Amino acid sequence: MASTIRVRATSNGDITEVQALIQHPMDTGLVKDAQGALIPAHFIQQLSFEHNGKRVFLADWGPAVSKDPYVKFGFKGAAKGDELKISWVDNTGATDTTTAKIQ
Amino acid sequence: MAIDVSFPVTRRLILKGASSVALIGLCGVSLHPGPALAANDKYPDDAFKQKSDAGAIKSLYGKAAEASDRVKLDAPEIAENGAVVPVSVTTTLANVTSISFFVSENPNALAASYVIAEGTMPSVANRLKMQKTSNVTAIVESEGKLYSATKEVKVTVGGCGG
């Protein structure tokens, strides 16, 4: 199965700008389906970005983050061609991991 | 040994050279130098359960924030779709270690909290759900102090369904 994580990491020589888009329902547990039954909470809790084994960015998310979450940030110290490792874990314990090459 | 070993203890054990592979597997995160960051690695479950801004800020940081014009919060005046409200923050403050977003009128105020490592820019953009018109607050932790910026976002269609 294709990864749930889509990442674009581009370096301008100094700062690497990272944009990530993840496929995830981010259900709050407060919404009912068409039959009136509550849809159980299902949301990503932590999203981590690592460069050369060093955590550069960690997101702690609640259910108020939009469905198919998007996040953008930047960091220093990486070069073009370096790998960025991205992983998430949700409240059901499901996880996904991918790596992206910095362009 | 108990399974729920907290991260700082685990790290100390590793540094001491105590049995390594299993412990690294337990925490599953990078060994970043700096105890402040390590302490923040655990998912702040309690903070996400708080109803109010103030409660969530207290749970997350244990202190209060002061408003600062050095925190620039960018959010729309009017959000047509409360399910997807683009919100971002940047700051000119130095040595930022954490950035968090709060939506006052949501069932739980804390929406997202980010741990900013050394060398990472103090700037984050993301998209949040908003149940109704509400104040959105960004908190920036810089050199151990909290600074905030707040903006009201009007929501025409709520983002929490139901």
Image: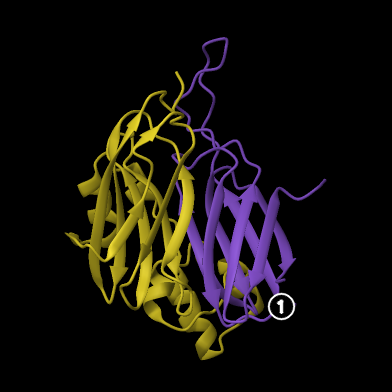
Q: Amino acid at mark 1?
A: Asp
Residue B72: image x %, image y %?
32, 59
Is A96 on the left-hand or right-hand side of B1?
right
Asked if A27 appears above or below B10 in the picture, the reply is: above
Q: Which chain is yellow?
A: B
Q: Name the residue rendered at 75%, 50% in the picture.
A: A3
Q: Looking at the rendering, which quadrant does residue B37 occupy?
A: bottom left
Asked if B148 appears above or below B49 in the picture, the reply is: below
Quick one: SS at disc 1? loop
Asked if A63 appears above or below A76 in the picture, the reply is: above
Instruction: Please state which of residues B92 and A52 is positioned toward the viewer in this rendering.
Output: B92
Q: Looking at the rendering, which quadrant does residue B113 occupy?
A: bottom left
Residue B52: image x %, image y %?
24, 41
* Quadrant assignment for the C terminus of chain B: top left
Residue A55: image x %, image y %?
55, 73
Q: Which chain is purple?
A: A
- The disc numbered 1 marks a residue on which chain? A
Q: Name the residue rendered at 50%, 20% in the picture.
A: A38
Query: Disc 1 marks which residue?
Result: A82
Q: Name the residue rendered at 46%, 70% in the picture.
A: B7
